[in-house]
Image (cartoon, helix red, strand yellow):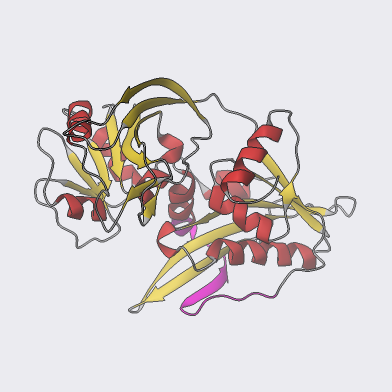
């Protein structure tokens, strides 16, 4: 079983300047007791903030840097590397924010300490309302001499699969022109790019069973030039950092294309890469004579939903339980349902 463990303020903060913006010794003890004897998975920044491997646990550091060294730790560069290290053991993801989001689709249980205060910070948990999770237990602890802020320890289990959200863009009339950021380049998928596609989708969705042929080529309305990648070049090295696929039904009766498998590396946030690679697909559909687009997504993918709304998509409610779920999502992203 894979679990995540973290402390979070009432306003969603999980970190500030590489550390925690509170000092709760008893919560540190809870963290130690819960994780002792189990593998712990963290990103490079989290390891550097700790300053050393945590004793009594296999410390696994996930980083893209092939030069990174962490004595006393297992250094991994891919999701598969981590899966090989933990095998069938019960393991804990301990941070930071990008690592929690990366493993979100594979985590079975959350151990969360809610610090009962609103605090300033620069790092936030990506799903502070815990959409898709069911509360299993909670225990409240008042403030005392050692712990100046009250806290509530909550344990969540993943809910059974719910129907995915559906969204629809009714018209392409107001699509903007592409505006790819400097240092990035939009390209059509080429043979040999499968590796790039899998890396991006694995980080965006979690899981280690992604395959371009299964997810894209075998789609009934696959077109060879319908998948786009955005590459980033730095110091002479080029890396694909975002992808999306346009699925286009050749039938003229179907006026809608389908936006499929949109993903982007979290390390490039703020560059609007998900927006631009999705826009490339919509423009492709428009050129093929389609007048609109549909897609499916999940309520925990809040950044993606914000992107789709900016592109002109709106909720297309297909199941009665989606009304309340959409209301909660809209509240969280600051929009009216």
251 sits left or right of 106 in the view: right
Name the spot of residue 297 as percent of width and height, x first: 62, 44
Q: Can residue 164 be seen here?
A: no
Name the spot of residue 206 as percent of width and height, x first: 44, 43
**Residue beneath the point at 23% across and 33% down:** 27
Q: Can residue 100 be seen here?
A: yes
User: Which quadrant is the N terminus positioned in?
Assistant: top left
> How many numbered tags mark residues here?
0
29 sits left or right of 279 in the view: left
Q: Is residue 53 magenta?
A: no
User: Which quadrant is the C terminus positioned in?
Assistant: top right
Depicted 179 relative to depicted 10: above or below: below
Name the outermost residue toward the top. Answer: 137
The span picked out in magenta is 177-196
Of helix, strand and loop, which mostly describes the magenta segment? Answer: loop
**Residue beneath the point at 76% across and 42% down:** 316
Of 173 and 200, nearer the camera is 173
Of 193 and 324, nearer the camera is 324
Name the spot of residue 2 as percent of width and height, x first: 34, 31
Q: Is residue 182 magenta?
A: yes
Name the spot of residue 196 as percent of width and height, x first: 45, 59
Of 141 and 266, nearer the camera is 141
């Amino acid at each position: 079983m894979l679990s995540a463990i973290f402390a979070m303020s009432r306003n969603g903060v999980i970190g500030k300047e590489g550390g925690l913006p509170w000092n709760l010794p008893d919560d540190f003890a809870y963290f130690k007791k819960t994780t002792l004897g189990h593998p712990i998975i963290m990103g490079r920044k989290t390891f550097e903030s700790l300053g050393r491997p945590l004793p009594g646990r296999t410390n696994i550091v996930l980083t893209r840097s092939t030069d990174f060294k962490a004595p006393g730790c297992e250094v991994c560069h891919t999701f598969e590397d981590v899966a090989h290290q933990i095998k069938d053991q019960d393991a804990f993801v301990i941070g930071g924010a990008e690592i929690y989001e990366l493993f979100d689709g594979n985590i079975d249980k959350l151990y969360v300490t809610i610090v009962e205060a609103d605090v300033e910070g620069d790092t936030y948990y990506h799903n502070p309302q815990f959409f898709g999770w069911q509360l299993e237990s909670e225990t409240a602890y008042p403030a005392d001499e050692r712990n100046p802020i009250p806290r509530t320890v909550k344990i969540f289990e993943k809910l059974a699969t719910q129907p995915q959200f559906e969204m629809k863009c009714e018209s392409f009339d107001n699509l903007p022109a592409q505006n790819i950021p400097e240092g990035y380049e939009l390209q059509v998928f080429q043979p040999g790019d499968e590796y790039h596609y899998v890396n991006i989708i694995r980080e965006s969705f979690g899981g280690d069973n992604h395959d371009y042929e299964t997810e894209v080529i075998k789609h009934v309305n696959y077109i060879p030039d319908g998948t786009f990648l955005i590459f980033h070049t730095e110091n002479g090295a080029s890396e694909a950092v975002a992808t999306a696929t346009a699925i286009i039904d050749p039938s003229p009766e179907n006026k809608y294309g389908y936006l499929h498998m949109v993903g982007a590396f979290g390390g490039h946030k703020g560059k609007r890469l998900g927006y631009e690679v999705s826009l490339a697909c919509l423009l492709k559909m428009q050129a093929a004579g389609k007048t609109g687009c549909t897609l499916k997504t999940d309520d925990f993918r809040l950044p993606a939903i914000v992107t789709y709304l900016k592109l002109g998509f709106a909720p297309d409610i297909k199941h009665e339980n989606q009304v309340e779920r959409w209301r909660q999502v809209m509240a969280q992203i600051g929009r009216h349902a």
